[in-house]
Image (cartoon, helix red, strand yellow):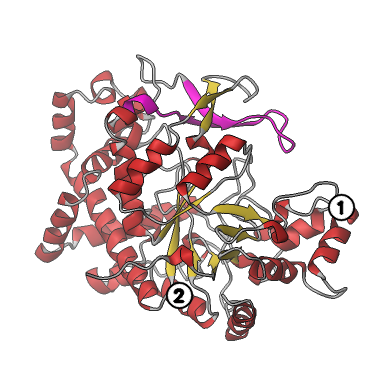
Amino acid sequence: MTRRIKWMARRRAGALMPVFSLPGAYGIGTLGRSAYEFIDFICEAGLSYWQVLPLGPAGKGYSPYSSPSSFAGNPLFIDWELAGQRFGGDIVPAKPASLPGRIDYASLSRQSDCVLRRAFARMDNDAAASVRHFAESRAWLADYALYEAIRADDTRQWHEWPEPLKRRDPSALSLARDRLRSQIDYHAFAQWLFFEQWSAVKAYANERGVAIVGDTPIYAALNSADVWADPGQFQLDDDLSPTEISGCPPDFFNADGQLWENPLYRWDVMERDGYDWWTRRLGAAAEMFDVTRIDHFRGFEAYYAIPSGASTARGGRWRPGPGYPFFERIKKALSDPEVIAEDLGDITPGVRKLLKRTGYPGMKVLQFAFDPDADSDYLPHKYERNCAVYTGTHDNDTSKGWYDGISAKERRFFRLYTNMGRLASPSWSMIRAAWSSAANTAIAPMQDFLELGGDCRVNVPGVADGNWGWRVREGLLTYGLAKKIRAITELYGR
């Protein structure tokens, strides 16, 4: 029996780089040459982790955190060149789908669908058998493929579909399967191709000593196959609309709080069936990733519930989450998977107690540390080993952008704390602070290694448009940069 590596138990470092941000010719990062070259770069840099964002199909605003499926892969990440090698090179368009440096999702989606449908049309008997075997081993796929097929036929949200389909009447589902069989088979084919390519990328990384850190959002999107296929797991009324929705309360950053608008879970129902839905979800994540970052960990201790239809999050209330029994079940069912707990936000003694009991490493974000008037827990000298320090996350500005935007008083404190010289880079001063800390895990977004400014950030929370589009330009991931990263990684024993 192969001994399982415990990645988080040792002192390591890594890079946060969304798949969509990889360079390449066809408008978006893919699971082809650029992914393999990035793994080679990580190895050359002496890093142990490649952290990605959620790999599911993008949802509202092209966000990977609002996906139509908690289990499926994003077909936009399928590499066209690899698909062309298998199904004929003439399926690949000659022109890129967008300009270098940004992603034109609308154009890319049309071109990607065209490429994949050409490949699907050329599927031979061996490929068809592989798709059937894949579908039989993925219990979620039948509902997801049917959901996508119906959604292409009726573009409204599923709770606006005709009542029989909305409520999953068996006769209506059977008629839909017969009528949309080719479309269902196409979506199953696309998922097979995605997971075949992703499995090869992950195997290549693991063979070279690189672990993949994935990301699992806490909530499912309302307009998703997850909620449509299993509405009893969610807080919905008789019309299958949410009774309350997710979000976070008002804070220093947002006086009205945030409306995320996901339906909330019926934790009582989930407890009665042994948290089966979550076990399947985190089990799928454990197959895809070596380590899983669970988003919004504090929601398992208590979650913020906002009345459906509210215009702000001000009227929400905290309600108890499932607590430790949930994680006890997950640990037992999945042989204690490796997890990073995103314990950011309104952290109470109860959340800290839950985190300690699980044994999971929490997160420290350095951009939150340097308020000279506060005694911040994010300052590196306060860290214990069992935590993961980030210079910033996908929701933060780049380190350079952050430094450019803070007050003179904060800058002075940052420079003093990090011993940053007059001509030194704020990005690399931040990286040095993370790498030199006691934390077992240290991760920086790729933009910080590249010393990029705020125009290269991935996401601005609360802003609906213009996110999830940054891509690294060709030629920036050089041997010289890898050598520089390796030097600081080796210096601090990572």
Three-letter residue code for mark 2: Ile
Residue, far top: 238
Residue 13 appearing in the image? yes
Position of the C terminus, as image quadrant, is bottom right
Position of the N terminus, as image quadrant, is bottom left
Which x, y percent locates residue 220? 42, 37
Residue toward you, 344 or 230: 344
Of labels 1 and 2, earlier in sequence is: 2
**2, above or below 123, in the image:** below
369 horizontally vs 463: left or right: right
Q: Which residues are magenta?
A: 244-269
Residue 296 appearing in the image? no
- Asked if the stretch drawn in magenta spans residue 251, the answer is yes
Residue under label 1: 407
Q: Label 1: state its secondary structure.
A: loop
393 horizontally vs 215: left or right: right
Residue under label 2: 39
Three-letter residue code for mark 1: Ser
- Residue at image coords 41%, 29%: 265
- Residue at image coords 29%, 24%: 166
Which x, y percent locates residue 124? 13, 64
Q: Residues within 10 Å of mark 2 (few under 14, many from 20)?
A: many
